[in-house]
Image (cartoon, grey):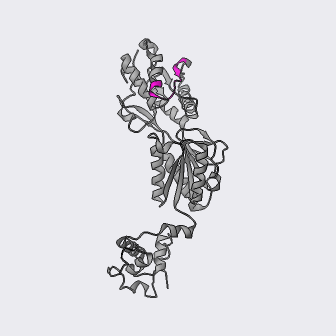
């Protein structure tokens, strides 16, 4: 007898699945045996369909009949029983420093959750507030709950101490780099993003360019490095006094822009500004408005992050280099899912994801002066 009952009459045992709903136990959750009775097949055939072993064992028509019977009954495989058989829980852990409680990087969480969901996995998230002891405890708790793998995600790009326990399961870092180089990481291609901002301004004829905002961190250094690389290729340099490191907030952009623009004759000030992030760019726009400098006719402004609910709603709408938060979450989850499928640990390499320029109205042709 084959798994679908051919040769033994199993497909015909209930009249070939004539649509009569089998007697059910009041309030009881439907079982795979209920599905088998309704579909007129063996219990083994139902097991094959819901454990991914149907191909080569069951005909397409039989597989479809089983799925239709399951849908009619509202049957879903028991994840606990399935986990006991496979020694997996179909749950991934995600430990963050503060992403889950922040509005800035929610796309990373959504990307990871949707990638996991598409492969019948859930994400269990723990936000530690950056407390190292809580990070270690969170990882230990997830391991105790037998998650299939763990993503560690950071709010801002930085090098991190690998929390204790991450080496005891499949683990991937997102938006951060391991201090010891021991785990795979998925991060933005920050240097290339800075280069993209420079090329956009160059393509619009700008040659007097400035940089405003930034911190003493990896992202600031890489963005400026890429910006200067692209300018250097065209024989353009940024004067040292036009690189204004004021921080990462709106007030930082406002202060930096006033320092560069206030009192400077139109022919002796920058015509384009590359900002550390969108908050800094918002401050630059505010300062330009106060000084009577029209954007983009008198000054073009490029931000970084393409921050949700902000960049597109500034006046004018802000051109920005987009951080690939969603893609980082998706890629990190896919690395774990691939490791589970193949049984091979992902190599401890760094994957850098593109940071595309999103063009809006804050960039225009360089003024002719």
Could you tell me which residue is drawn at 58 percent across and 55 percent down? Answer: 141
In the rendered image, the vertical position of residue 304 relative to residue 48, given as above or below: above
Q: Is residue 168 visible?
A: yes
Q: Nearer the viewer, residue 163 or 319?
A: 163
* Image-based side of 76 in relation to 235, left or right: left
Q: Nearer the viewer, residue 97 or 77?
A: 97
Image quadrant in which the C terminus is located: top left
Res 59 quadrant in image: bottom left
Q: Nearer the viewer, residue 173 or 146?
A: 146
Which x, y percent locates residue 148?
Answer: 56, 59
* Image-based side of 30 in relation to 347, left or right: left
Q: Which residues are magenta?
A: 241-252
Q: Is residue 184 visible?
A: no
Which x, y percent locates residue 195?
Answer: 52, 32
Q: Is residue 249 magenta?
A: yes
In the rendered image, the vertical position of residue 76 relative to residue 275, given as above or below: below
């Amino acid at each position: 007898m084959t798994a679908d009952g051919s040769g033994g009459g199993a497909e015909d045992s209930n009249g070939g699945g004539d649509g009569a709903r089998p007697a059910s136990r009041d309030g009881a959750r439907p079982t795979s045996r209920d599905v088998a009775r309704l579909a007129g097949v063996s219990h083994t055939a139902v097991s094959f369909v819901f454990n991914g072993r149907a191909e080569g064992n069951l005909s397409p028509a039989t597989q479809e009949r089983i799925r239709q019977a399951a849908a009619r009954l509202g049957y879903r495989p028991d994840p606990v029983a399935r986990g006991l058989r496979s020694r997996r829980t179909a749950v991934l852990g995600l430990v963050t420093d503060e992403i889950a409680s922040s509005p800035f990087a929610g796309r990373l969480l959504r990307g990871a959750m949707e990638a996991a969901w598409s492969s019948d996995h859930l994400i269990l998230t723990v936000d530690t507030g950056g407390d190292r002891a809580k990070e270690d405890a969170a990882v230990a708790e997830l391991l105790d709950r037998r998650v299939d793998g763990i993503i560690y995600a950071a709010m801002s790009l930085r090098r991190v101490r690998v929390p204790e326990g991450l080496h005891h399961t499949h683990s991937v870092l997102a938006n951060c780099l391991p201090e010891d180089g021991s785990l795979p990481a998925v991060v933005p291609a920050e240097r290339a993003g800075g280069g993209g901002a420079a090329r956009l301004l160059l393509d619009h004829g700008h040659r007097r360019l400035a940089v405003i905002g930034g911190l003493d961190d990896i992202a600031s250094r890489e963005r400026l490095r890429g910006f200067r690389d692209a300018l250097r290729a065209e024989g353009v340099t940024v004067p040292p006094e036009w690189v204004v490191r004021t921080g990462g907030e709106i007030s930082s952009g406002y202060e930096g822009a006033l320092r560069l623009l206030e009192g400077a004759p139109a022919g002796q000030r920058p015509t384009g500004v590359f900002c550390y992030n969108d908050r800094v760019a918002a401050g630059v726009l505010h300062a330009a408005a106060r000084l009577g400098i029209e954007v983009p006719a008198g000054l073009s402004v490029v931000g970084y992050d393409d921050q949700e609910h902000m960049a597109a709603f500034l006046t004018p709408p802000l051109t920005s280099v987009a951080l690939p938060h969603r893609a980082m979450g998706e890629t990190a989850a896919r690395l774990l899912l691939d490791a589970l499928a193949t049984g091979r640990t992902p190599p401890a390499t760094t994957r850098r994801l593109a940071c595309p320029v999103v063009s809006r109205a804050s960039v225009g042709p360089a003024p002719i002066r």
